[in-house]
Image (cartoon, rainbow, N blue to C red):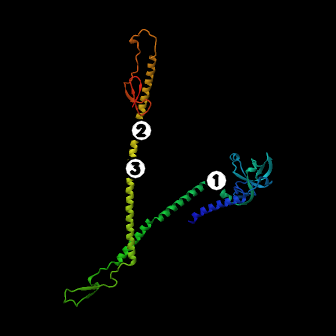
Amino acid sequence: MLLWWSFPFLALSAVGGYVAAAIAWHVNPPVVPVEGHSMLPVLRTGDLVLLHGVQPDQIRLHEIIAVAVPQQDQQKYGLPAEVVHRVISISRVHGQLIFQTKGDSNPGPDVFATPGANVIGRYAGTIPDVGYLVLFVRSRQGLIFLGVALLLGIAYVLLGMFDRRRSEDPTPLVLEALIGETGRLRQAIAETAPSRGPPDAGLPARDTGAESAGPSKVTVLLPASEAPRLPSGEDTYLLRRLVDTVADSNHRSLQMEKELADLRAAVGEYALHLQSHTAAVRDLARSAAELRDAVADIRLLARRAATEQRASADTDEPAEPTAAAPAAEAPADPTPLPPAGWYPDFTGEPQYRYWDGRAWTGNVC
């Protein structure tokens, strides 16, 4: 238990120390691990460098500073996100200070120049070998370890909550007490049961003075060790507890059966509702299909009616009197028209419109 609680304590302590150092030293991050041998012999791999915040115009030549490496240089040369190197030159470009840094054991300067905005802080000291922990946490293996530790912590908390809920439930404790009290009650009953032995095992005492008055009466006196013992107060309390426990268990069982019956009824009602809902959806889909077919037929009839109305309008125009043409020369209509009657309205409205055999009328119903 103490080991499990030590991990959250250490994590909170580390976070609190990090935040306190960042606030006190006016720098973020306040510590940077050393990775590589570029600053030998001053700094070694695994050292944890302590930083203090500093303004760019306060930095001098040959001071050790921590700078942020540009993203493109990290990807191109495989450099870490921060490096701690020594300043070898300071220049000003367009009013901005530019710092050129170099590792003490490197043959040449760094491949990048650092503007004042990328300076993290000034070197203030080191803690040997503590940087290995930070490097491990930053690595892929460290991230996997932290993820597994976090999952284990969450599982531990959830299991603890489950155990507490079980401990708050009186049912296991009641059952355990019931079993123990039943055993003790059996033992008490066995101890209080009268001993049965041969007829002459007791201490008989005969009443001789009443022999002439009537039938003889024999009084048997048992030893004190064989006399029946009444239940004690503790046995009575245990018996009462047993009866109360059994009654409570029966009440819980009846309540659980009632809840299960209600649940079965609710499930059955939901099943009926779901069945009716499914049937309604099926009928709605069938009605929609029929409505689409009806609309298609109405549109076809409307196009035919419009065509015939235009044709009749063209034939009704006045023309100069000419010789009557033979009736046989009139063009025959190749498309038969539906007979006169009531049809679904071609406008899509939920109504019927009368078709007189040649064109739609204004009569609707």
**Mark 1 or mark 3, which is nearer the start of the sequence?**
1
Residue 107 shows in the view = no
Q: Residue furthest top?
A: 323
> Residue 158's spot in the image, x, y percent?
52, 59
Going 60% across and 61% down the picture, which residue do you hit?
A: 8
In this rendered view, identify the residue nearer to me: 130 or 277: 277
In this rendered view, identify the residue nearer to me: 291 or 256: 291
Image: 186 above or below 165: below
In this rendered view, identify the residue nearer to me: 281 or 223: 281
Residue 270 tag number? 3
Q: Amino acid at mark 2?
A: Ala
Which residue in the protein does label 2 denote?
A: 285
Density class for disc 2 (Cα within 10 Å; few <14, some 14-19, many ≥20) is few
> Residue 184's spot in the image, x, y percent?
39, 74
Q: Amino acid at mark 3?
A: Tyr
Single out the mark in the foreground, 3 or 1: 3
Which residue in the protein does label 1 denote?
A: 139
Q: Amino acid at mark 1?
A: Ser
Going 39% across and 69% down the picture, which residue do you hit?
A: 244
Single out the mark in the foreground, 2 or 1: 2
Residue 306 shows in the view = yes
> Residue 70's spot in the image, x, y percent?
71, 47
**Mark 3 or mark 2, which is nearer the start of the sequence?**
3
Quarter in which the N terminus is drawn: bottom right
Per the model, the C-alpha gap separating discs 2 and 1 is 59 Å
**Mark 1 or mark 2, which is nearer the start of the sequence?**
1
